[in-house]
Image (cartoon, rainbow, N blue to C red):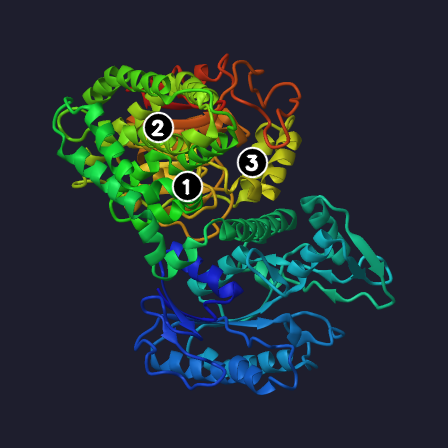
Amino acid sequence: MRVLVTGATGFVGRALMRRLAAAGHEAIPVTRGPAEEPGAVRWDLGTEPAPAALPERIDAIVHAAQARNYRAFPGDAAEMFAVNATSTAALLDYAARAGASRFCLLSTGTVYEPFDRGLGEDAPLAPTSMLGASKLAAEVIARPYAALFPLAVLRLFTPYGPGQTARLIPSLIDRVRGGQAVQVSADGEGMRLAPIYVEDLCAIILASLDGGWSGVFNVAAPQATTIRGIADIIGRLVGRAPVFEVGAGAVLDLAPPVAKLAGRFDLGTLLPLEEGLARTVASEHQQQAIGHMAQELNPCSPGIASTVAGQNSFIARLSPLANEVNATLNSVAAQQSAESSMADAIARIEARLAADDQWKSTIGPLANEVNASYNVLLSFFAGQNALTALVSGLQLGPLANEVNATLNSVAAQQSAQGSMVDAITRIEAQLAASDERMAALNALVGSGTATVSVPQLGPLANEVNATLNNVAAQQSVQGSMTEAIARIEARLAADNERTTGHNLLLGRGIARLLSRPVADRLVVQPPHEVPAIEVQIRQIEARAPRNFAQWHKVYLRFISEVERSVVGNLSHDGQVGAGYFRMFINIHARGRLLDFGCGQLALPDYLADWPHDQLAGFDPLPPFEPHPFVFATSLGETIPWADASFETVVIATSLDHVYLLDQALEEMKRVLVPDGRLLIWTAMFPETPPYDPYGPEIVPADQNHLFHPGRNWFYDLFASDFDLLERMETVTQSEMLAFRRKLQ
């Protein structure tokens, strides 16, 4: 269906646009400001007549717009009436001319004011506010058009969810979190109401369009609660007991009967209030975390602002490094054998550094700026997938930290005790000893498609040369570098095996990325329908009731604290592990790829190189912004795709949040083709209690996990159905595992 949506940038409108697109409809937004989206129509409903830019033909219209200043009476009464009533008349007239076969008008429970005559759809109406009066006027204007096409009037009661501001639920969240008193009525409970989650509201709107509903429907949750009940839930979610202030007012009942709605829509699928509030609180925490991160990053690199505005100053500062990276990459592309000399590469870098006195004097500030501006650098080189992967592999952030730590150590040296000759000799010996590793690395890349000798010099050569040049310039006043060199050598020795493995991983990933075929590929199909999350939760409870309460407790806590893992989790483009897992995926993945628990970020960084039409993902939580790939809302025990739908399934730190692990593994095997790949990044402990949700009561491993994978039992889960292709330990207590489904 082609669906015109007014109020498309508002709270309900934004969610509805996403839902329509996910359902395969063509959604055309009407916006007050400039029409930025393709096909959008600019129309200020409060001041302008219907524009000529409206589509000639339309299938359905959802009138979701509402006046901005609906409380400002009488100051904005004219705009309120224009948006709520006059524009409704214009849209109805347009619908009749454009051949619309559906019309959905979003009204409000405020039409029942002063709430003393019942809240049934047939109750007498005499609203006392301008908002209620103008919305009722729109309903009255719409009635004659019901003879021309199905026309549903949805009277909304307390919609809520992520992204809402200046309304009851977000106000209660702010007050509880801030320790401010929540006002309740004399009975201590406060107003009765039945809030409905915004995604559920959108599902009802779509059902009204698909089913061709006509008539007036109250839209609210079937279970009523009170202000105190909502505040208590919020208190548990934010970890702070609410403070109540009892007033003298009468109890107001805003929980309407919804029997008429229940006759058209299964209200049992609506999200429970506690889970909806958990998602809303988590979203607000996420927005605060992003704001705090932005405030912290802002003073770290004054050059970022000029970079965004024109990038002139930042590019000028980064040009030596950018030129070096480009020169190195060009060198990589040109190399056809494993004969290129590390000594020549070092000499070229040393010559550049020696000739650039200003670079030596500003390495410290530039290192800080590189560290804070790592994402900006990646964006600057966006458009070249292989280049982006290499820059990501260089790990400029950790390098900048290491450079700064070294420079600070140099500045702290106060004596003049030693010569740099021995130190240089030792470091050169260390570099020479790595020739054999580089030869092995180039052999792995193979076939002349690419070689990564020069890029692998980046972290080591830059560190060594920055250290040597700075120390050489300060020998007369800064004393001995013996301790600093010893620390560098100790780090090199301790990290030798890990660095070699990661460099090999990088090279293999780049080679596979450059050689991946792009033609004749299958694309991901849409998911099939699955029960709502709450229904899925009840289903897994029925299968394993003994430990369900413990799992559900850690599950809800994880949701409420999800903001703590947004910056540091494996999905984030600033996380070191994401870059390694990205290369691991590039090596082993193939074809259509399903991300098991894809998270709330739009595109996990470890999937950045994969074509979007070959990607799909599912998660119990909705994304902060729409995913650029096919997405479904589901738990891991119910994967909503047909058998053999994917060549690869990827799991990044999600498997230890699953309750019924055996059922999830069966689902993964089911959706994989024979010989398909299963790629896992997971925490891994030497030994943990084998996980059995059906057995005796389990003591949770920590506040967010019912269990931790242990080497003593975890691999055995896959032995009957999968072959282990590769196992790689990481710098943290985790592993990357590549399995291949057995041909059976």
The quarter of the picture where residue 598 lies is: top left
> Measuring 52% from the left and 64% from the top, which residue is drawn there?
12
Mark 2 residue crowding within 10 angstroms, few (<14) / some (14–19) / many (20+): many
- Where residue 557 appears, as percent x and y from the top left, is 63, 38
- Label 2: state its secondary structure: helix
Residue with the mark numbered 3? 539
Q: Is residue 390 above or below residue 305?
A: above
Residue with the mark numbered 2? 464
- Where residue 551 appears, as percent x and y from the top left, is 61, 31
Classify the position of the N terminus by image quarter: bottom left
Marks 2/1: CA distance? 14 Å
The quarter of the picture where residue 731 lies is: top left
- Label 1: state its secondary structure: helix
Q: Is residue 134 above or below residue 354?
A: below
- Where residue 698 appears, as percent x and y from the top left, is 64, 22
Marks 1/3: CA distance? 53 Å
Residue type, mark 2 in image: Val
Give the mark nearest the N terminus, 1 or 3: 1
Mark 3 residue crowding within 10 angstroms, few (<14) / some (14–19) / many (20+): some
